[in-house]
Amino acid sequence: MAFINTTSSSEVSSYSKGSMLYITMLTLVATLGGLLFGYDTAVVNGAEKSLVELFIYKEQAGSYIYPPDIMTVISQYKLLMTAVIYLVFLVISGQIIKLLGNKKGFTISGLIIVAVSIWAYFFMSKPIPTPDQTVELKDTVDAVKGFVIASALIGCVIGGALAGFISKTFGRKNGLIIAAIAFLVSAIGTWKPEAFNFTGLHTVYSFVIYRIIAGIGVGIASMISPMYIAEIAPANIRGRLVSYNQFAIIFGMLVIYFVNYFIARQGDEQWLITDGWRWMFFSGVIPSALFLILLFFVPETPRYLVLKDKEDKALAVLTRIAGKNDANKILGEIKETLHEHNAPWLSYGFMVIFIGIMLSVFQQFVGINVVLYYAGNIFRNMGASTDASLLQTIIVGAINLLFTVVAILTVDKFGRKPLMIIGSIGMAISMFALGFTFYLGGTELSSTSSFMALIFMLTYVAAFAMSWGPVCWVLLSEIFPNSIRGAMSIAVAAQWIANWIVSLTFPMLNDNVWLVEKFNHGFSYWIYGLMGILSALFMWKFVPETKGKSLEEIEKLWKK
């Protein structure tokens, strides 16, 4: 994050005399960024089956039917995948340089690029499987499937990496406007990727490019939306107002689950494959346009305005927020305390960086986005129809929302570590049980096995929503000292990269011919269960409890 907590006790009392209605309205506008975060990342869940059948393959009676241009799809996938890997590792290299400094950073970054180049050489030189190589071809198209479905996450890495620069250079408000435009362009482009194909690539990769644009919006909003709220809100209710952004993310997911279900009900399976999925993505035009329009009516944050020497405008905003009598006093406090820090990221040792990165990685490696992106696929593996799978996905979204509220209400009462450890154990048990349900149930689950699988899925989502979902972000916002708050960007980048890896590899694990023959779709869930156990051990051994501690007290932990 690029902001720091600069609020004194006098500012708290002054803010409390201001217009809470105005503050609430500004918060609600900013949380639309969080809502679109959830909306855009989860929309693909309803469209995943249609996209696969339209562009990649159809499964009929245990065999796979590929479109005539599948070789073009695969060859262009290899080119785009190579370009994306280079791009992702360039982003990682930038973070490494910030972490280690120019000399060490450039050396390690150079080694990374060399390693990526070696991988790219072998990846590009590997021949494309021919139609008679059935197993190899199926494994390859599963990789293509993962790339297409998880493509938005590539943009999330880019947007997350750029968010700090955008918020500092263009402002918090303008950063959100850029995100809103990205959401809007993506909603229109993914609706008709063949009509808006300006690249000359296959239509599926025109779709991928617009999904990457959506991801850029998500990456920007994931950082700047809570930043805007934190800088506009009174200190005494800042935590609650910022937590509304996490609630908005989950609510956005639940909304798109309903939208997907409603759209799927408008036609048959064939209509859903040819046209229905398009309207799922186009539905994002409504919240995107609303977000963009409302942003023109909100102010820039006072702290950013002071940072850019626009004190008159900052005073005008503070007058509306805190009242005329106290605005000048608060402005003086901001001028005295607001300053950007550029301390080396290793000023407090490597452990705080390590903990931040591992919190982010474990949040994804426990498999949550497999559920959020591929829930429909998972439910179809249980034997559900498309409509039934989308309806069950709505139940997943409702459980996610309900237990997120539980976390918001209990995180300051029970503490961070207990919630995180309990959540890890709950997720591990649920994932192991889900894997064994598939493994023992055979190729077609009975009604009892399907019901048990749904229960295990819901307990997993509940365990995540009350722990690693919102509480991980609370810890990330607390553990980084003010002077190296910018180091949080490396944890955010690690989170999006881990998210992408999990989303990319799930189809390879879940649909691999050999693994399905041996484990009946159960293998991948055992891996996520193991990650749940490791995350519990990590929390118990390495992460300090931050409940009830001031940011200064937490900072002293790293000084020791």
Image (spheres, grey):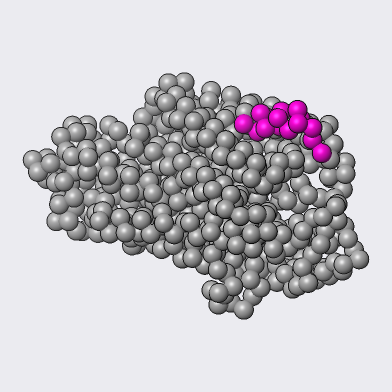
Q: Where does the image place residue 366, in percent across and percent down from the top left?
A: 64, 38
Query: At 79% from the left edge and 65% from the top edge, which residue is drawn?
Result: 66
Can residue 55 be seen here? The reply is: yes
Going by the image, does 337 lie left or right of 78?
left
Q: From the viewer's perspective, is 182 left or right of 135?
A: left
Going 48% across and 56% down the picture, which residue do you hit?
Answer: 283
**Compared to 515, does 216 lie above or below?**
below
Identify the residue at the far top of this view.
414
Q: Is residue 271 magenta?
A: no
Residue 449 in the magenta stretch? The answer is yes
Q: Is residue 219 visible?
A: no
Position of residue 462 relative to residue 393, above or below, is above
Secondary structure that dominates the magenta span: helix
Please, which residue is most extreme toward the left here?
Answer: 325
Magenta region? 444-458
Q: Give whichever of 23, 539 is nearer the camera.
A: 23
Whole-percent x, y for residue 463 in the image:
58, 29
State the residue in front, 251 or 424. Answer: 251
Q: Nearer the viewer, residue 4 or 283?
A: 283
User: Which image quadrant for residue 286?
Assistant: bottom left
Residue 147 position in % (x across, y down): 67, 59
Answer above or below: position of 560 versus 112: above
* Residue at 44%, 55% in the rendered image: 220
Residue in the picture at 31% in, 44% down: 27
Q: How many marks?
A: 0
In the image, taking residue 219 as reference, residue 123 lies left or right, namely right
**Residue that extends furthest to the right in the rendered view of this protein:** 132
Q: Position of residue 151 (x, y in %)?
A: 61, 59
User: 238 or 457: which is nearer to us?
Assistant: 457
